Image (cartoon, grey):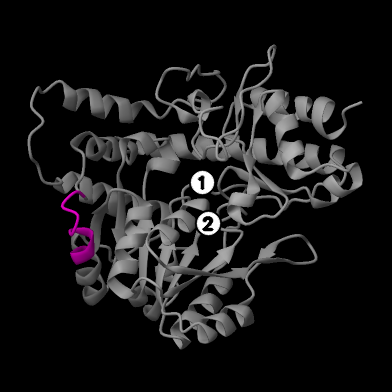
């Protein structure tokens, strides 16, 4: 490969909660490992790979000019997004006017909710549910209504359209969050699945917030289908949220964007986004996106997806072969595994807390899945060099799931 996905980065002291946050955030972060074990960071949803050099080059080039005053997003910024969406997602007809800045995807979620709902209103989400949605909605006084995903006979996560419709009607819901691809389950929804979901939302007059931040990280020949592309109605009722942060490991720079085609939705959302007078782009974040969305960035992402596919396939095969009582569905996108440990805990007389702690003790810093509404689950980040994934599986086998 042209790019480096094998070197082990030492992120200690480099502003990474993935390693420096261990033992400092009780109830959220893993504990520090016991003496003799180094940390394998597999909890926070960022990557342990160096980002594409074109991003660093773009930032360094801008930093050479010693003034960082007020600015407006450049034409190059908008054109980079338009070209990226066209080439990666097959999006046509996207114009500068449809693109708006958000400090983060979750900030965009709240802007939409403030525009089309009020505190106390119910919002539909699928569960398992990304913890960021839960925290943001609860902090803003919304009532979360879950429509659980179900696994079919092949273990593939599916939406329950009847349940969605029933709960939307029962709770008089008019705003819904759709995660595409899904975090933490890793589903890359097929076009027919999105079409059926959008019919439910249309029939119930719901505004749809589509979180598509994982849309570049598609594994093993799957294909991302933007929600707004499945019909004209979906195009009009959906606010789609994107960012280069997951794709290129840029979360610390801040910077997301929305795509809204309908002028009415766009005006309402932007009015809410502006209320804080703080939802403004960072100049270095702008140049980072421009550097990311260059041809070099596309080439890097293609290689990254190959690496992630290999890691996911290895971990899935290892877990299903060696960890009896652990259930999981192979992700089609993202770099997260979501493991259901219910049967293992029952068979071994352990609680999920004891299981998690056993992993933390040997340096496998995985994440409590209960935060994602998985009652006895663990979320595992596989965006690491393969050698670290191998080592994590070895430790889990010898010291946790099959400890003597």
> Which quarter of the picture shows residue 212?
bottom left
Residue lying at 59% horizontally and 47% vertically, measured from the top left: 219
Numbered range of the magenta stretch: 270-278
Give the position of the C terminus as an image quadrant. top right
Q: Is residue 200 above or below residue 250?
A: below
Q: Label 2, on which residue?
A: 181
The x, y position of residue 140, in whole percent, is 37, 61
Magenta-span inclusion, residue 94: no
How many residues crowd mark 1 within 10 Å: few (<14), some (14–19), many (20+)?
Answer: many
The disc, 1 or 2, on the residue closer to the chain's N-terminal end is 2
Magenta-span inclusion, residue 274: yes
The x, y position of residue 204, in whole percent, is 46, 86
The x, y position of residue 379, in whole percent, is 64, 44
Residue lying at 55% horizontally and 78% vertically, measured from the top left: 196
Q: Is residue 316 above or below residue 113?
A: above
Total labels: the figure holds 2
Q: Is residue 313 above or below residue 40?
A: below
Say left or right for 326 vs 243. Answer: right
Q: Label 1, on which residue?
A: 217
**Marks 1 and 2: CB-CB under 8 Å?**
yes
Q: From the image, state whether disc 1 or disc 2 is nearer to you.
A: 2
Say left or right for 178 vs 260. Answer: right
Say left or right for 330 vs 258. Answer: right
How many residues crowd mark 2 within 10 Å: few (<14), some (14–19), many (20+)?
Answer: many
Q: In this rendering, does residue 75 appear at all?
A: yes
Q: Which mark is residue 169?
A: none
């Amino acid at each position: 490969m042209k790019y480096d996905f094998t070197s082990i980065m030492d992120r200690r002291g480099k502003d990474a909660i993935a390693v420096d946050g261990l033992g400092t955030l009780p109830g959220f972060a893993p504990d520090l490992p016991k003496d003799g074990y180094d940390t394998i960071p597999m909890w926070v949803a960022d990557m342990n790979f160096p980002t594409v050099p074109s991003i660093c080059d773009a930032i360094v080039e801008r930093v050479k000019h010693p003034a960082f005053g007020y600015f407006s997003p450049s034409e190059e910024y908008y054109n980079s997004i338009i070209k990226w969406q066209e080439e990666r997602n097959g999006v046509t007809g996207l114009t500068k006017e449809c693109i708006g800045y958000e400090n983060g995807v979750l900030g965009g979620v709240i802007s939409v909710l403030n525009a089309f709902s009020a505190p106390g209103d119910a919002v539909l989400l699928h569960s398992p549910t990304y913890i960021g949605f839960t925290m943001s909605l609860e902090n803003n006084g919304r009532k979360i209504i879950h429509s659980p995903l179900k696994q079919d006979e092949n273990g593939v996560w599916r939406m329950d359209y009847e349940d969605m419709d029933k709960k939307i009607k029962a709770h008089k819901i008019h705003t819904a969050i759709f995660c595409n691809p899904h975090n933490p389950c890793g589903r890359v929804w097929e076009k027919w699945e999105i079409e059926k979901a959008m019919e439910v939302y249309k029939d119930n007059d719901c505004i749809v917030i589509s979180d598509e931040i994982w849309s570049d990280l598609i594994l093993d020949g799957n294909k991302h289908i933007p929600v707004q592309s499945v019909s004209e109605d979906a195009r009009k009722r959906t606010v789609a949220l994107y960012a280069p942060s997951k794709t290129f490991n840029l979360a610390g720079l801040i910077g997301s964007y929305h795509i809204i085609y309908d002028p009415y939705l766009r005006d309402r959302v932007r009015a809410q986004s502006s209320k804080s007078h703080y939802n403004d782009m960072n100049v270095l974040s702008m140049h980072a996106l421009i550097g990311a969305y260059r041809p070099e960035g596309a080439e890097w992402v293609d290689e990254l997806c190959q690496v992630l596919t290999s890691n996911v396939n290895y971990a899935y095969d290892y877990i299903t072969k060696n960890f009896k009582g652990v259930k999981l569905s192979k992700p089609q996108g993202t770099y997260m595994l979501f493991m259901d440990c219910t049967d293992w805990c029952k068979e071994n007389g352990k609680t999920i807390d004891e299981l998690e702690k056993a992993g933390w003790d040997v340096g496998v810093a995985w994440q409590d899945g209960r935060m994602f509404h998985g009652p006895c689950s663990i979320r595992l980040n596989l965006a690491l060099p393969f050698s670290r994934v191998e080592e994590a599986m070895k430790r889990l086998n010898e010291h946790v799931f099959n400890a003597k």
